[in-house]
Image (tube, rainbow, N blue to C red):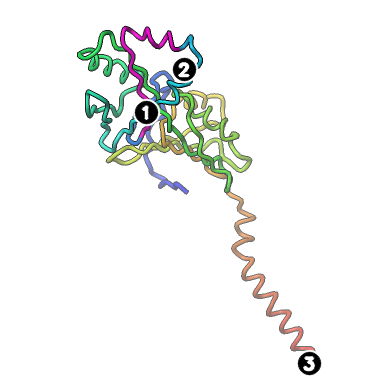
Amino acid sequence: MFKTKLDYEFDLPKDTVNEGYRISPNDQLIMRLFTNGGARLLALTADDEATRLLVQNDIFYIVNQNGFVDLPEVGEIFIQGFTLKEAELMLEELYATLYNSPYVFINVTNNRVIIFPGSGGDARVIPLVNNNTTVIEALALAGGVAIRGNASKVKLIRRIPNSDPDVYLMDLSTIEGIQYAGMSVQANDIIYVEPVPEIAGEVLRDISPFVTIITSLALLYGILGGF
């Protein structure tokens, strides 16, 4: 899976742990708006029942394929590529024309990353609870690199709308590789650990049909030769 040519030019891995998650198409957002700098939010926090009702009444907003989200009173807003903090500040400015000292809270609820740890049948879809989840944290959530996984060849595949995907090749087999493990993963990223080839097993699987045929013919010859 996910093979690349020998001369494939990989993107350079980078430490993005401090950048934070950037909103992408198909993200499912919770947006909460409070006035007066969030004073009501503090009051709700002190009331467990009110907080529970607030969570139950959350409304979800979907970022469309073009990067826009349709929000109450302000309409369609381009939000793709913003970090959560940037999006909150941008919406606070928009709602400031309608409300007194608005305080906006945004959360993404459907973040996930797909991980192939290097062994067939062990692939997992990992929900991203932490918006700054790194490559090494995501691998840990999936149980780490599998026994057959080659830690020196870990690919992070990031799909880019209307463009070729970014593909990063990381060597996590040495302590120096920790610099690459600090990359923050994004929603729908694919982490693929190349498996170590099982040459003997693959050769055996390839020749086993021929061995079976030869054995069957020899058995048949032996039976017929006995008559």
Q: Which residue is mark 1?
A: 59
Q: Is residue 175 left or right of residue 56?
A: right
The residue most toward the bottom is 227
Q: Is residue 205 left or right of residue 90?
A: right
Q: Nearer the viewer, mark 2 or mark 3?
A: 2
- Taking the spot 61% from the left edge, 53% from the top edge, the residue there is 199
Other-residue count near label 1 (Cα within 10 Å), few / some / many at <14 / 14–19 / ≥20:
few
Q: Secondary structure at mark 1?
A: loop
Membership of 227 in magenta stretch = no
Q: Which residue is mark 3?
A: 227
* Residue 7: numbered disc: none
Tag 2: residue type? Thr
Tag 1: residue type? Ile
- Taking the spot 37% from the left edge, 21% from the top edge, the residue there is 106
Q: Is residue 96 left or right of residue 203?
A: left
Mark 2 to mark 3: distance in Å? 88 Å
